[in-house]
């Protein structure tokens, strides 16, 4: 589960930085967010669900402690 979380969240770090740069550029230019921003957001959202589910799985395993 830890490997799944890392595999999902490492790309998310790059995606978030790129989204931040695109948002800053659009704000500075006074334009709408570019299509690339929305595409990256979809990837960010899609990678977040399996990572979040894996975190919940880890918590469940710590609480239930199956033998």
Image (spheres, rainbow, N blue to C red):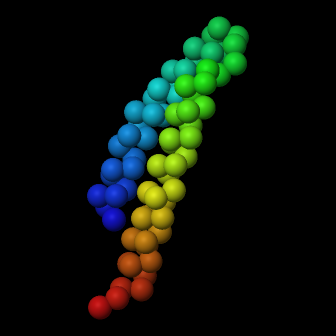
Residue at 40% over, 33% down: 14
Of all residues shown, which one is farthest toward the top?
A: 29
Q: Is residue 44 left or right of residue 4?
A: right
Residue at 69% over, 18% down: 32
Residue 17 horizontal/vertical position (percent): 46, 29
Residue at 39% over, 50% down: 8
Q: Quadrant of residue 5?
A: bottom left
Q: Is residue 9 above or below residue 54?
A: above
Q: Is residue 66 left or right of residue 60?
A: left
Q: Nearer the viewer, residue 25 or 63?
A: 25
Q: Is residue 20 left or right of residue 13?
A: right
Residue 4 horizontal/vertical position (percent): 34, 58
Q: Is residue 20 above or below residue 28?
A: below
Q: Quadrant of residue 22?
A: top right
Of all residues shown, which one is farthest toward the bottom?
A: 67
Residue 52 horizontal/vertical position (percent): 48, 59
Residue 11 horizontal/vertical position (percent): 38, 40
Q: Is residue 47 above or below residue 25?
A: below
Residue at 43% over, 72% down: 57
Quadrant (top left/top right/bottom left/bottom right) for the N terminus = bottom left
The count of marks equals: 0
Q: Is residue 31 above or below residue 43?
A: above
Quadrant (top left/top right/bottom left/bottom right) for the C terminus = bottom left
């Amino acid at each position: 589960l830890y490997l799944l979380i890392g595999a999902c969240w490492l790309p998310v770090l790059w995606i978030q930085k790129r989204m931040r740069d695109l948002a800053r550029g659009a704000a500075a230019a006074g334009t709408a967010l570019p299509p690339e921003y929305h595409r990256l957001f979809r990837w960010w959202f899609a990678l977040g669900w399996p990572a979040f589910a894996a975190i919940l799985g880890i918590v469940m395993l710590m609480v239930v402690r199956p033998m």
